[in-house]
Image (cartoon, rainbow, N blue to C red):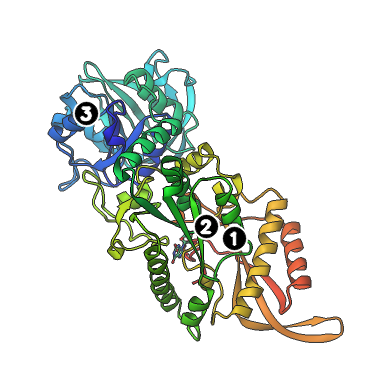
Amino acid sequence: MADSDPALKPVLVLDFGAQYVQLIARRVRERHAFARIVRHDITAERVRELDPLALILSGGPASVYEPGAPHCDPALFSLGIPVLGICYGMQLICEAMGSQVRANPARGEYGRTPCRVLDSREPLFHDVPHETIVWMSHGDQIQDAGVEFVGLAATPSCPIAAVRHRRLPVYGLQFHPEVSHTPYGSLILGNFLDRICNNPRAWTMGAFVARSIAEVSRRVGSADRVVCGLSGGVDSAVCAALLARALGPRVVCVFVDTGLLRSGERDAVAAAFGARTAAELRVVDAAGPFLQALAGVIDPQEKRRRIGHVFIEVFREAARSIPGARFLAQGTLYPDVIESGGEPDGPTATIKIHHNVGGLPQQLGFELIEPLRDLFKDEVRRLGIELGLPDSLVWRHPFPGPGLAVRCLGEVTAARLDVLRQADAIFLDELNRAGLERQVAQAFAVLLPVQAVGVMGDARTYENVIALRAVETEDFMTADWSRLPQDLLARVSTRITNTVKGVNRVVYDITSKPPGTIEWE
Ligand code: XMP
């Protein structure tokens, strides 16, 4: 969508296999430039066509001097487009232009490292203190800058920690400016964009809304309607709100109540949506078919399979009854697009098959509209705020498509879901009251398929066990368990055992991912 705006020149981030490549793109966007991740071997000719503001070469696990190491088209450096190489990217640039790259004699530098800026008049280091800290993670480094480059910074074991080409707008950083452990990293990236690339700062959510509205209106025309599935999560809600801005009542939102939702979820969606947008909201009550399909099923993958199947059937039925509906909107995000290899110039799909977040197959016979496919999650939240959605929806924890079915271990029944739902609501309520909901990335209760002995009053009990799970994570690929305050956990445990009938024991999950996953099933 952003391609259609000539004022919005992209910053192309060439992917050399860095763990942090998406983080680089996000940091660039925080500086109001439109970053796009592209494959590392993109040709200079294609780059010229894309007419970027700048090129950033990412880090990567290879050594530039090894056979088979990924390289870029050397013609990129003479296009006159500013280039910034990060870690492997810097080594690649320097090597291509005659400098020597060798293994660090001290076996590399890893972690927080003191760094000296050699000349604070350099635009790249504007306002960065003379003595600073940077995050290093490298085994190789530039041995000798050669005649083409000037060294701009040094660490105790890496004398050439940043470089500038003497004639071309080409720069390199051995350290990682994109990670938060480099305190001035964001400023350094900002300096590169603003002071070296003349960044017009055109990437803002306000401008994005205006562009998207124009684009959606053009594509949908004035007669057709758009069906938008709401899942209760932030992506589909923001997608629907954006479409409603563009198309008003021609957007029909379908919210399927699977009977597997958290407490109050259906009402929250209805309240946040119905009142605030001009879109029509249809709530489909489908708890019956879902519970029926899940009867007697214990295997987690089989639960997912059956839920997916029923969901498509129910949605298909609901969509059929909407006259004039030609388009189906989906809240696909940029990381999904890159990771599935769905971008024309993007890196190939190697990372993961994304969980299908309530995704609906195109074979439903609609044309697909994906207005968020250029955005990262944090941008979707900012867009949600821009569009006036309530904080409670915008800052919602992610909730898996199969819902409580994968948190109700063992058989899924209405009665067991009810127990789980009550315990889950207490946990989230206490977390909220303690002001910790935003600090944790995801928190929920799990109903275990075991019974435990307890004592209540003078009587022995033999009842259900609830596990509490709270994790902190940036990307949900790895996660650490949250060190929640003990008194908070105590309050949750007391409230659950006192008020949720059928539960006599509460445990707290202290497993990171890996080796655990976030969900239990
Ligand atoms: P795991 O359990 O794999 O979860 O560590 C990572 C993130 O994905 C969510 N998740 C799912 N989302 N359908 C979804 O839409 C699923 O089947 C599914 N399984 C896990 C999970 O809640 C966490 O945010």
Looking at this view, name the residue that lies furthest to the top: 121
Instruction: Identify the mark nearer the N-term, 3 or 1.
Output: 3
Which quadrant of the figure has residue 308?
bottom left
Q: Position of residue 252 (x, y in %)?
A: 44, 54
Task: Read off the residue under disc 3.
Answer: 51
Task: Read off the residue under disc 1.
Answer: 265
Q: Is residue 215 left or right of residue 74?
A: right
Q: Position of residue 75 (x, y in %)?
A: 13, 30
Q: Position of residue 502 (x, y in %)?
A: 71, 80
Is residue 167 or residue 503 the one in the foreground?
Answer: 503
Type of amino acid at the residue the image marks with label 2: Gly
Is residue 319 or residue 61 the one in the foreground?
Answer: 319
Q: Position of residue 58 (x, y in %)?
A: 30, 39
Q: CA distance from mark 3 to mark 2?
A: 39 Å
**Which class describes the residues within 10 Å of circle 2: few (<14), some (14-19), or many (20+)?**
many
Q: CA distance from mark 3 to mark 1?
A: 45 Å
Q: Which mark, by number, is residue 232?
A: 2
Q: Secondary structure at mark 2?
A: loop
Type of amino acid at the residue the image marks with label 1: Glu
Whether residue 316 is visible, yes or no, is: yes
Q: Which mark, by number, is residue 466?
A: none
Q: Nearer the viewer, mark 3 or mark 1?
A: 1
Which quadrant of the figure has residue 167?
top left
Q: Is residue 275 left or right of residue 162?
A: right
Residue at 15% x, 35% y: name it.
Answer: 46
Instruction: Identify the mark nearer the N-term, 2 or 1.
Output: 2
Residue at 33% x, 35% y: name it.
Answer: 35
Q: Are marks 2 and 1 in contact (CB under 8 Å)?
A: yes
Instruction: Identify the mark nearer the N-term, 3 or 2.
Output: 3
Type of amino acid at the residue the image marks with label 3: Asp
